Amino acid sequence: MGMELDSSPLLVSESPQTATKKSKKKRKREKERDDGAAAAQLQNEPTINEQPRLDVKLELVNNQVDKTPPVVGYFPSGYNPHKTNDINDAQEPILPLAAPPSVKLYRNAQRAKVEKSSSEKNEKGRTSERLELVVSPNGSNVEFVGNSYKGEAMAAQLCTYALGVLDKATQTLKIMPIAGNKILRLEPKLRGSLAADKEHANFENGEITAEQRAARIRQLNVQYGPKKSIIQDKKMQALRKGDDPLSQKDLGRKIENAPINKDALESTSGHSARNIPPYNSSAITPQEAYPLDGIILTGEWDFLEDIYKILQVGGEVASNAYPTFVCNRIQKLREIQDEVEKKRLSCIFSYITHLIKFKDQHSMDGVASARNHQFPSIIRQKFFEMFNPETRRLSVDKIDLLISYVLVLTLYADDFRTFPADVSNDLRMNPATVKSHYRNLGCKMEREKNKYLVTLSVPLEFPQPNRKFRKR
């Protein structure tokens, strides 16, 4: 008996899990195929911002004895010598463009001769060249000075600097060394205040006379030598000052016959005893009596904007960073609507702060409060030149001068009517002593609300020194 087979197709049913796995693999292959097609299309399309490639010729320029290589410097203060008016992009500028700053390069003449002779034998002879670059902005009292022989330039240097100049017309890249193999740091300094730096540089270069060298050695001996050496030095100085007796008699006759201007003598002695900032005795307004431009120079205002910037962002002035006199008048600053006046008064408060902190840094009782205070470099340099602290202490005359500067600025801050209580606390002085300093400035004292009120009246009237006459 035969069996008949069905020729219809055989249906095989798959589980849903198997179908799902196959569909995931299929989607993955389709995604990879689409991504490959998109990448191939992007490679075929040219980019819009692609810079054309240049095949340049490299040319090395060596040092030349009779030519100065390029000088490279930077401004850590943020000064931009190419900055002009903010409306340069306009078609018709309203204000004229500022003149570009003047640039001067100084070299040590004696070292240049030595380096020139040594460079004939050794090509590396000019790497020790001493340079000084001075950039002077037009119409400003501040200069930017950088040198290659002290400061940041004395740090360890493990590389060689070079300057590359690309000429697109000839497709040539010139590589040339820079002057001194140094990138100069251009620090702001007051114009005309480089005498101390030049004197220090001359001492480093050995360009001082025998008298100057002897004076320096004598000064070191007085400061750090033993007591016996100090006594011997004083005796030698007394011997050097002694003149011939005949010359002394002749000098005495000349002094007796010389005319004496008593008015000039009194004014000179009074000014030296007062030890106060520059003043105008014939002024008709308090602002003219002590000109503010004679205390804060034009180039210093831009470095005194710390309090003003804090107020601009709505911050709080830290009481441990600023004197009590300043903190008690912050609310007065906030209420001023005129931005120019607010900025001017903020800079005056900053200058008062720097003066008081400088005094604290060079005194026994206030050094802890000024340990973390940051001075702008231009302000610190000016203070060292004005007050000339011996080692870490200020002399009595310099302390009196610094106090006079502080008190004059407090008069400006309070419209020439101020109470001396808070500034006495900041200066760590007895209020009676502070009042005597105010009188020495030509101020008057009044009683108001059981307190002493200090006012400045014009024309200035200074207290007359007590003079004792010898009976004949």
Image (cartoon, rainbow, N blue to C red):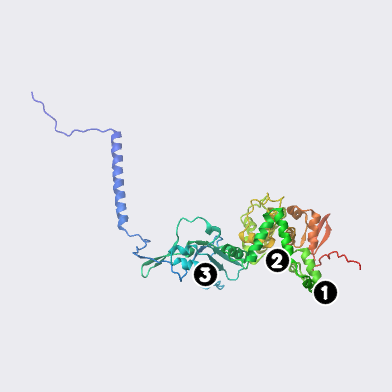
Left or right of 132, for residue 396: right
| Image depth: mark 1 or mark 2 in front | 1
Three-letter residue code for mark 2:
Leu
Left or right of 402, for residue 1: left
Tell me the distance, in whole angstroms, between the alpha carbons under discs 1 and 3: 69 Å
Question: Which picture quadrant has residue 140?
Answer: bottom right
**Res. 434 in view:** yes
Please rate how many residues cluster around mark 2, counting C-alpha atoms within 10 Å: few if below 14, some from 14 to 19, many from 20. Answer: some
Residue, far right: 472
Tell me the distance, in whole angstroms, between the alpha carbons under discs 3 and 2: 33 Å
Three-letter residue code for mark 3:
Asn
Of residues 256 and 161, the one nearer the viewer is: 256
Q: Which mark is residue 256?
A: 1
Of residues 331 and 33, the one nearer the viewer is: 331
Of residues 164 and 28, the one nearer the viewer is: 164
Q: Position of residue 440 (x, y in %)?
A: 79, 62
Whether residue 210 is situated above or below residue 393 in the rendered picture: below
Q: Secondary structure at mark 1?
A: helix
Q: Quadrant of the N terminus?
A: top left
Is the Cβ of the residue at disc 3 closer than 8 Å to that at disc 2?
A: no
Q: Quadrant of the C terminus?
A: bottom right
Q: Which residue is mark 3?
A: 88
Q: Which mark is residue 292?
A: 2
Three-letter residue code for mark 1:
Glu
Left or right of 210, for residue 68: left
Q: Position of residue 71 (x, y in %)?
A: 49, 66
Q: Secondary structure at mark 3?
A: loop
Q: Position of residue 359 (x, y in %)?
A: 70, 55
Q: Position of residue 150 (x, y in %)?
A: 55, 60
